[in-house]
Image (cartoon, rainbow, N blue to C red):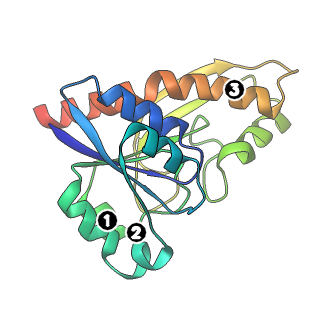
């Protein structure tokens, strides 16, 4: 059984969904959630789900090898679920094609530094897009530029506020993210 370490920065709805999904499969288990926000709601979710969790700071991640060493011991796959920092190349190199991220838009549109959460939904609404969606992709050294694994779309209408767009995106994330992670793990194992 493969081990997944989830990185989160906020409320943790995607992390919780992934944890619950893999509690019912033989493919993998979420063994730990790592978070760079000491006050994130994801910690409460981890406590209620009895999942190990750890706060870390920039020094642990970018300067020291604290997080890298933990991942070498505890992870087969890394999943970014609302994690906002760029992953250091030293981690990317060791976990090549085993770091998966979700983005709340149809990349390459609305990607890059600063494009996350409501920033994306506001830009989508401001540009009167007719559709948006999610992109699940591998992580490389640049924000939102890793190879695309999967996309799902939802149509928009002119009355959709950024908040309404966020609701539509959340539905797609909850439906597809855990399943696509499992497909990646199964295809990697069989390659």
**How far apart are the alpha carbons under marks 3 and 2?**
31 Å
Q: Which mark is residue 91?
A: 1
Q: How many marks?
A: 3
Q: Mark 3 or 1 closer to N-term?
A: 1
The local secondary structure at tag 3 comes to: helix
Measured as percent of width and height from the top left, residue 162 is found at 79, 34
Mark 1 neighbour density, 10 Å: few (under 14) some (14–19) many (20 or more) = many
Q: Quadrant of residue 177?
A: top left
Q: Quadrant of residue 56?
A: bottom left
Q: Residue at x 40, y 82 (%)?
A: 63
Q: Residue at x 56, y 63 (%)?
A: 38
Q: Which residue is mark 3?
A: 167
Q: Are marks 1 and 2 in contact (CB under 8 Å)?
A: yes
Q: Quadrant of residue 18?
A: top left
Left/right of residue 4 with respect to residue 106 in the rendered view: left
Q: Residue at x 20, y 30 (%)?
A: 27
Q: Which mark is residue 164?
A: none
Front residue of 178/19: it is 19
Mark 2 neighbour density, 10 Å: few (under 14) some (14–19) many (20 or more) = some
Q: Which mark is residue 88?
A: 2
């Amino acid at each position: 059984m493969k081990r997944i370490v989830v990185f989160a920065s906020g409320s943790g709805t995607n992390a919780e969904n992934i944890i619950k999904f893999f509690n019912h499969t033989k493919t993998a288990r979420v063994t730990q959630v790592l978070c760079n926000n000491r006050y994130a709601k994801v910690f409460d979710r981890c406590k209620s789900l009895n999942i190990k969790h750890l706060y870390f700071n920039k020094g642990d991640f970018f300067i020291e090898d604290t997080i890298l060493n933990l991942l070498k011991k505890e992870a087969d796959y890394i999943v970014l679920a609302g994690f906002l920092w760029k992953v250091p190349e030293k981690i990317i190199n060791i976990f090549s094609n085993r770091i998966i991220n979700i983005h709340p838009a149809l990349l390459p549109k609305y990607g890059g530094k600063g494009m996350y959460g409501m920033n994306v939904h506001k830009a989508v609404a401001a540009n009167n897009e007719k559709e948006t969606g999610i992109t699940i992709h591998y992580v490389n050294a640049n924000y939102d530029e890793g190879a695309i694994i999967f996309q799902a779309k939802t149509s928009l209408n002119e009355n959709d506020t950024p908040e309404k767009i966020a609701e539509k995106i959340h539905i797609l994330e909850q439906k597809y993210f855990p399943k696509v992670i499992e497909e990646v793990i199964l295809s990697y194992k069989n390659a």
